[in-house]
Image (spheres, rainbow, N blue to C red):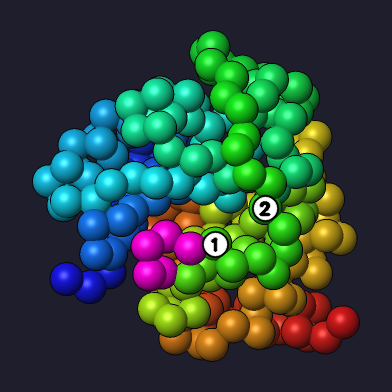
Amino acid sequence: MGLQVYQFPCGPLETNAILFGEGGIGAAIDPSLGSAEKIVVQAQQSGLKIEKILLTHSHWDHIADVHALKEKTGAFLCVHPLDAKNVEAPGSDGLPLYFPIAPARPDHLLRDGEIVTVGSLHLEVIHTPGHTPGGVCFYLAGQSILFAGDTLFCGSMGRTDLPTGNAQNMGSSLRKLAKLPPKTRVISGHGPDTEIGKEAWLQSPRFSNS
Ligand SMILES: [Zn+2]
Ligand SMILES: [Zn+2]
């Protein structure tokens, strides 16, 4: 069986938790509030063993079920070092917490350009600060899929007005994404999928020139 990808919009902001995998090995991305149970059930039905939890960033709506999913699966938690603190001490990023979030300890700190393996799948880590300092996108080059978190949405970009935001960094991060092949499917942290080539504004001079 080829690549399997499942999306679970969960929590008050309908944050897209994701389960993906191939050949019996899987990983979860951004387990949002209420997603852990759904991810585990889907993984069982799909015959996927969840070996890793990957975080695009550590905003509360993306980490609410990290602790629960780690408990259920024993999966290895991966996050960029600049976003790790808010996983260990939820709320320390300065955003209000609307409900308590259990802390979790990262097992691995992601580096820009690193290749994360999930079974036979290879995901390139692209550091994309701007929405948060340690924001990353995960690029499955072989399958032409980008897990974009809250950096790039269908028709828009992530907020930079939050305490974790930086508009200048967002500009350079979007310029990196604009260079990906136009047919790349983009799965975002909220809302519907898109493609790099469908986001015409990404190619505007503001983002395509240095
Ligand atoms: Zn966010
Ligand atoms: Zn979000």
207 vs 63, nearest the viewer = 63
**Disc 2 to disc 1: CB gap under 8 Å:** yes
120 in the magenta segment: yes
Q: Is residue 94 above or below residue 29?
A: above
- Rounded to the nearest angstrom, the CA distance separating label 2 from label 1 is 9 Å
For residue 18, side relative to residue 29 (left or right): left
What residue sits right under mark 1 in the picture?
116
Residue 129 found in image quarter: bottom right
Residue 50: image tag: none
Q: Where is residue 198 in the image (x, y as percent from the top left)?
A: 48, 81
For residue 133, side relative to residue 49 (left or right): right
Q: Is residue 72 above or below residue 80?
A: above
Residue 110: image tag: 2
210 vs 24, nearest the viewer = 24
Tell me which segment is drawn in magenta: 117-121
Q: Position of residue 72 (x, y in %)?
A: 33, 27
User: Is disc 2's CB within 8 Å of ligand 1?
Assistant: no
Q: Can residue 33 be seen in this view?
A: no
Tell me the quadrant of the picture where the N terminus can be found: bottom left
Residue 74 found in image quarter: top left
Q: Which residue is drawn at 87% across and 82% down?
A: 210
Q: Earlier in the sequence, mark 2 or mark 1?
A: 2
94 vs 54, nearest the viewer = 54
Q: Which residue is drawn at 71% across and 75% down?
A: 176
Circle 2 sits in a helix, a strand or a loop, which is it?
A: loop
Name the kind of residue labelled 2 in the image.
Leu
- Which is the main secondary structure of the residues drawn in magenta? strand
